[in-house]
Image (cartoon, grey):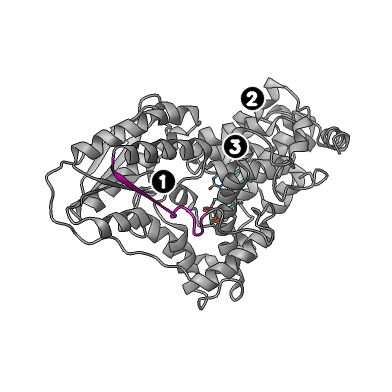
């Protein structure tokens, strides 16, 4: 039997469940395929920097597979509806009679996969899908009443106990196979409809070896102080693995396995930095499970349905100022500029920027969610939607509506000397450590020399407005 492995968000050869299964079942070789779906990607608001990151990783994946004599075919299926027949054609042409792939959990992706399974089975080819993007399949981690969790902490405790019970198995890359007579495709330089992001590719190098080095270096040098330092954007304290996890260049099993190994194999006790980091990786799993348990969140609907009645403001000027990093609130502006410059934003700042849009500007969280997706190299429907709904008080574990970050206090607390602001808002570099958090307070005369906007809203008034709106729907 010859098997076809369909790579999607699992661009690696180590610990790739579908690839390992395909290799186990093949006695006449494995063929790999990746499909580009530019039209669908644009509809899904995929960021240009993320598509560029995929291409870099495909180049590395192709090399890794070539080392195993596995050819990588790359073709275009513009929309997901084109995928089944394109895949079938590739399977037939490369003489494969079985297909393996790792599951994804967003609604359109699930529908696409169901259509593939139906067509392949109708045509007499076998299909196997695998759990890989998460450690446990959505539906396996349920409450005592057999329901999906809607709150993180009990979910995490269940996850911990399941990991302790089942362990974490990391599968090695498959052995080298006999060469087969199929040529690999060229990896394209660009994808139609995606303009160059302008983001330096060296910020996010491709390849599973690089991702593994990033993980190892984080565990060796920074994980121990993670709990203490993770909220300070000027410190390089977090793993910056999110783009790699999102594209599957590294697996959550590899991450948790490595972290547990550095913690005497413990998951819920021991070194506090490690325990905390593992919890964050489980947040990612939680949001993937939410996508399946509560599919409405994939369809632009709030997790807490009553919040659908909130009448968000419609103010294009404010939205634009937020997008441009010109709100007059330095930490918010630095955050937005960081995202445009490197395609990534520090977690504390994602919360600050999202709270500012939804609470201070009182604009619809869906607009912010979409803008983030269009700019993030790690844009992930589950985590992005979860983070936005948390900030807007419409989601799981949502921040209660009355907990509203004050963007200036956040700035004083988490960027006390203004080092992060100075990096991304250089026009404020000349201000001292006190004024940099709130330039509207400096004397009028000095303000004139500053090429920086006045605050576009008054935080206190904005706070009252949002409190009233949420109280009205209670
Ligand atoms: C409004 C908002 C939007 C967000 N959008 C995304 C997104 O599109 N993609 C994304 O991967 N994360 C998103 N996050 C979560 C979080 O900000 C990023 O995962 C984190 O900043 C990535 O940096 P890191 O890899 O250094 O994380 P680390 O702190 O090193 O954490 C390790 C890994 O755990 C996961 N993780 C950490 N924090 C969270 C979290 N709060 N929720 C879910 N997973 C988490 C990530 O996979 C991360 O790589 C969002 C958070 C908010 C508040």
Please tell me how crowded label 3 is: few (under 14), some (14-19), or many (20+) other residues with Cα within 10 Å. many
Residue 76 visible in the displayed image: no
Where is mark 1, residue-wise?
A: 9
Whether 277 is drawn above or below 355: the answer is: below
Q: Which element is circle 3 on?
A: helix
Quarter residue 386 falls in: top right
Q: Does the residue labelled 3 lie within 8 Å of ligand 1?
A: no
Q: Which mark, residue 200? A: none
Q: In this view, does 229 lie to the left or right of 132?
A: right
For the point 49% across and 44% down, the residue is 378
Q: Which mark, residue 336? A: 3
Whether 82 is drawn above or below 290: the answer is: above
For the point 50% across and 31% down, the residue is 44
Q: Which element is circle 1 on?
A: loop
Q: Which tag is nearer the camera, tag 3 or tag 1? A: 1
Q: Where the C terminus falls, by quadrant?
A: top right
Per the rendered image, the range of residues in magenta is: 124-137
For the point 54% across and 39% down, the residue is 339
Residue 427 location, x and y as percent? 61, 35
Query: How far, Cα to Cα, is label 2 from label 3?
Result: 11 Å
Where is mark 2, residue-wise?
A: 320
């Amino acid at each position: 039997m010859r098997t076809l492995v369909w790579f999607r968000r699992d661009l690696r050869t180590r610990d790739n469940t579908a690839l390992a299964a395909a290799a186990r079942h093949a006695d006449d070789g494995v063929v790999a395929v990746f499909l580009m779906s530019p039209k669908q990607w644009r509809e899904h608001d995929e960021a240009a920097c993320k598509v560029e990151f995929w291409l870099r990783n495909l180049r590395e994946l192709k090399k890794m597979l070539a080392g195993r004599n596995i050819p990588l075919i790359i073709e275009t299926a513009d929309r997901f509806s084109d995928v089944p027949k394109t895949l079938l054609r590739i399977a037939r042409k490369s003489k494969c009679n079985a297909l393996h792939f790792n599951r994804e959990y967003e609604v359109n992706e699930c529908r696409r996969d169901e259509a593939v399974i139906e067509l392949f089975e109708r045509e007499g080819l076998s299909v196997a899908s695998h759990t890989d993007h998460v450690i446990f399949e959505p539906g396996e981690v349920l409450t005592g009443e057999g329901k999906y969790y809607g709150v993180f902490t009990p979910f995490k405790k269940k996850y911990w106990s399941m990991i302790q019970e089942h362990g974490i198995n990391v599968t090695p890359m498959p052995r080298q196979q006999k060469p087969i007579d199929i040529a690999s495709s060229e990896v394209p330089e660009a994808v139609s409809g995606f303009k160059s992001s302008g983001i330096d590719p060296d910020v996010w190098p491709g390849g599973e070896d690089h991702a593994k080095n990033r993980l190892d270096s984080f565990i060796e040098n920074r994980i121990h102080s993670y709990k203490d330092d993770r909220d300070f954007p000027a410190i390089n304290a977090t793993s910056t693995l999110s783009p790699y996890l999102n594209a599957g260049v590294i697996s959550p099993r590899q991450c948790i396995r490595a972290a547990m190994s550095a913690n005497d194999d413990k998951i819920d006790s021991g070194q506090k930095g490690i325990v905390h980091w593992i919890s964050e990786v489980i947040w990612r799993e939680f949001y993937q499970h939410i996508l399946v348990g509560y599919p409405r969140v994939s369809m632009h609907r709030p997790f807490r349905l009553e919040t659908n009645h909130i009448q968000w403001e419609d103010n294009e000027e404010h939205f634009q100022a937020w997008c441009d990093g010109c709100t007059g609130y330095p930490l918010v502006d630095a955050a937005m500029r960081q995202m445009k410059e490197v395609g990534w934003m520090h977690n504390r700042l994602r919360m600050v920027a999202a709270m500012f849009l939804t609470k201070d500007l009182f604009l619809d969280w869906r607009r912010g969610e979409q803008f983030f997706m269009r700019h993030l190299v790690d844009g992930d429907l589950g985590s992005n939607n979860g983070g936005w709904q948390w900030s807007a008080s419409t989601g799981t574990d949502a921040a209660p509506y009355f907990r509203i970050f004050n963007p200036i206090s956040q700035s004083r607390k988490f960027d006390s000397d203004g080092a992060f602001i100075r990096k991304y808002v250089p026009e404020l570099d000349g201000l001292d450590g006190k004024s940099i958090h709130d330039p509207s307070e400096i004397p009028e005369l000095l303000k004139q020399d500053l090429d920086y906007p006045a605050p576009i809203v008054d935080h206190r008034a904005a706070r009252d407005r949002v409190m009233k709106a949420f109280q009205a729907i209670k």
